[in-house]
Image (cartoon, coloured by chain):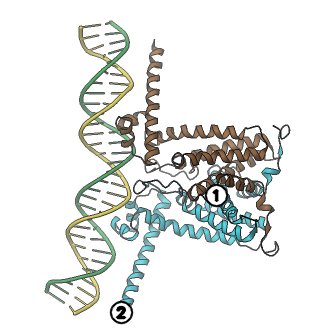
Chain colours: A brown, B cyan, C yellow, D green
Amino acid sequence: MDTTQRTEQQRSADRRRRELLEAADRVVLRDGPGASMNAIAAEAGITKPILYRHFGDKGGLYAALAKRHTDALLDSLRAALDAPAGRRERVEATLDTYLAAIEARPQVYRFLMHPAEGGQSGDQGFDVGKHSAPLLRRMGEELAQVIEERLDLGPGSQQLARVWGHGIVGMMHAAGDWWLGERPCSRAELVRSLADLLWGRLAAAGDRMGGPGF
Amino acid sequence: MDTTQRTEQQRSADRRRRELLEAADRVVLRDGPGASMNAIAAEAGITKPILYRHFGDKGGLYAALAKRHTDALLDSLRAALDAPAGRRERVEATLDTYLAAIEARPQVYRFLMHPAEGGQSGDQGFDVGKHSAPLLRRMGEELAQVIEERLDLGPGSQQLARVWGHGIVGMMHAAGDWWLGERPCSRAELVRSLADLLWGRLAAAGDRMGGPGF
DNA sequence: ACGTGCATGTTACTTGCGGTAACCGCAGTC
DNA sequence: GACTGCGGTTACCGCAAGTAACATGCACGT
């Protein structure tokens, strides 16, 4: 009785929460990050305090919102990363999956990469680390795990894998961000260029003038 | 007369501007980004409207502030990049210079990486590209230029160099950000790991289990 | 049947920010 | 001595985050 009651209410609350999140999604995707709580509440057909009851503060709402998209993106990345294929193919597939995602829905991308939005309240003490978007951190950690369990890197492999995980993710992110803004080439070309970089072409390339002494 | 007067006033204005910038610097380094204009004005011993007269709006002030630090960092990076040494040494020196800088003054780093702060006004139309911090873009472009004029990359070298420039900068940034937050290893180890990544160790590493078929 | 919780929703407020308008006082000039 | 330009101020506007206090409806115990 008591339990069924509780679950019933919980269910209703969860449904409501999901509805609110979808409304928030629509607004954020339309108005960009920095959409006001009032606007979101209006889109959901209610008023501000309800949002605050459900999500605590704006950060909470945004975190919940980001989690949905982040989880979805990470799922597709995992699929590409785990495909039964050679290493180079898997790397290219993963890069392409990420780039296709940010290309298809740039507003979502922009929202996810935003560190903390306004952040004027509660930002005290400015945690100097962890300034990056949570998405980047999570992608880095997941990639690190895959690298470490798939590759034989000798001693210190765990630390190396983590450095590489975050490094590669950062490379992908920065290149993707730049590419999305300037569109200097096709997605396939970008994927190929990045894979080439990871495959050591930087070290293998010849000097343009004189010997390596200069 | 008129000109000397003008220059006199200009000089005074420039000196004032520099003083204001230094005060702003102190506040931002103390309170983190999101420091209020009121606080900055108070630190400078004046009031808000003067700041607005000098810098237009908060974005202007922050841009001026960021430019100083960005220029300084880019100068030292250029020095490391242009040192008379082998390619690997130059890469390691550059990585180390960047990491040393963010390690020495993490607050400056955090400030510089902040895309647009509040950005609630004038952020309309959300430019989907160019979301990155200007510092990252500038570093990427500079590195691209160095790569392109130093390395022989065959056809399409310019585009390849730009992709690599932004990609490498992103790698450095993300790894540095993560490292700064968790401090999982020494700076030298991090530099070495990243250089190894760029030198193709990812491609060269052996599989951990079974053949490449799985 | 009837009050009692309790979740849901509202209006109306406070605080603090970015940004601006309008006013002050003091140099120098004619 | 009135006039103008410049550094400076107070006092305000608009707006967004967040909160307090009040209303409403629906299931329950007795």
In the figure, A72 relative to B83: above or below?
Answer: above
Under circle 2, the secondary element is: loop
What residue occupies the far right of the structure in this picture?
A: B211
Instruction: Chain letter for mark 2, please.
Output: B
Mark 2 surroundings: few (<14), some (14-19) or many (≥20) residues within 10 A: few
Q: Are marks 1 and 2 on the same chain?
A: no
Q: Residue at position x 41%, y 46% from top?
A: A35
Q: What residue is shown with label 2?
A: B1
- In the rendered view, tell whether residue B37 sits above or below residue D16: below
For disc 1, the chain is: A
Residue that numbered label 1 is attached to: A185
Residue B34 picture location, percent across and down: 45, 56
With A13 as the anchor, is A187 left or right in this view?
right
Instruction: Say the numbered circle drawn on residue B88.
Output: none
Q: Is residue B208 left or right of residue A9?
A: right
Instruction: Report the amino acid beneath label 1.
Output: Cys
Location of the N terminus of chain A by quadrant is top left
Q: Is residue A32 rendered to the left or right of residue B81?
A: left
Q: Amino acid at mark 2?
A: Met
